[in-house]
Amino acid sequence: MKKFRVLFLALFLFSFGLVMPGCTQEGAEAPEISAGTWYNSDGTTLADNHDKIVIVEFWATWCPPCRAIIPHLKELHETYKDQGVVLVSLSNEPAATVGDFVKKAGMNWTIGAESNTAGEYGVRGIPASFIVVEGKIVWNGHPNGVEAKLKEIIASRN
């Protein structure tokens, strides 16, 4: 029983470790994003959206905290898509896994599968989000914290 508790505690702590922000510094040049397969889009790049506020979110279908944040991301997308904000979620999982999940979850923003971009951002745990403005990282952390910074950026542009 004690081994089970230790294992459970380790898994619990590991799960919370997955919500740590990436290590790429704010103010740094944002690495370009890429994916092997795109959903809800023909694909996108930061260069294509240089004049927009881009939220780059790293996630996986198997990750409970990632799944839990989907309703919040849907709300963010719907609220801010007409205000110059682009949401892009990237997973390193196979396209078949991501594609089926995206349909079932109703994820209607730009989703990339088979992406190796997380490594370039220094992501050590998921979910992790980055806000990119004019090619620079202006914020990174858990997706729950995106909206406060997003409002600040939008207000400063108006």
Image (cartoon, helix red, strand yellow):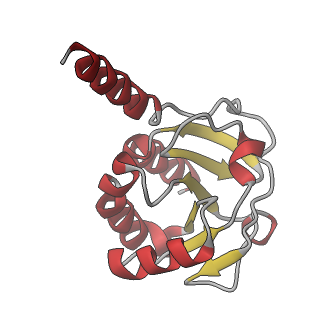
Provide residue 130's location: percent of width, then percent of height: 59, 46
Q: Is residue 150 above or below residue 107?
A: above
> In the shown orientation, is residue 135 left or right of residue 152?
right
Q: Is residue 35 above or below residue 124?
A: below
**Residue placed at 37% from the left, 44% from the top?**
144
Q: Residue 60 appears at what percent x and percent y?
A: 50, 56
Quadrant in which residue 55 is drawn: bottom right
Residue 19: image location, x then y, percent: 44, 36
- Residue at (39% x, 61% y) in the render: 73
- Vertical comparison of 125 with 2: above or below: below
In which quarter of the view is residue 48 placed?
Answer: bottom right
Along the viewing direction, whichever of 26 and 2 lies nearer the viewer: 2
> Which residue appears farthest toward the left when viewing the image?
1
- Quarter of the N terminus within the rendering: top left
Q: Image check: 83 left or right of 67? A: right
Residue 107, position as x, y percentages in the image? 41, 75
- In the image, farthest residue toward the top: 2
Total count of labels: 0
Q: In this image, 95 relative to 34: left or right?
A: left
Question: At 44% from the left edge and 67% from the top edge, which residue is drawn?
Answer: 80
Residue at 30% across, 17% down = 6
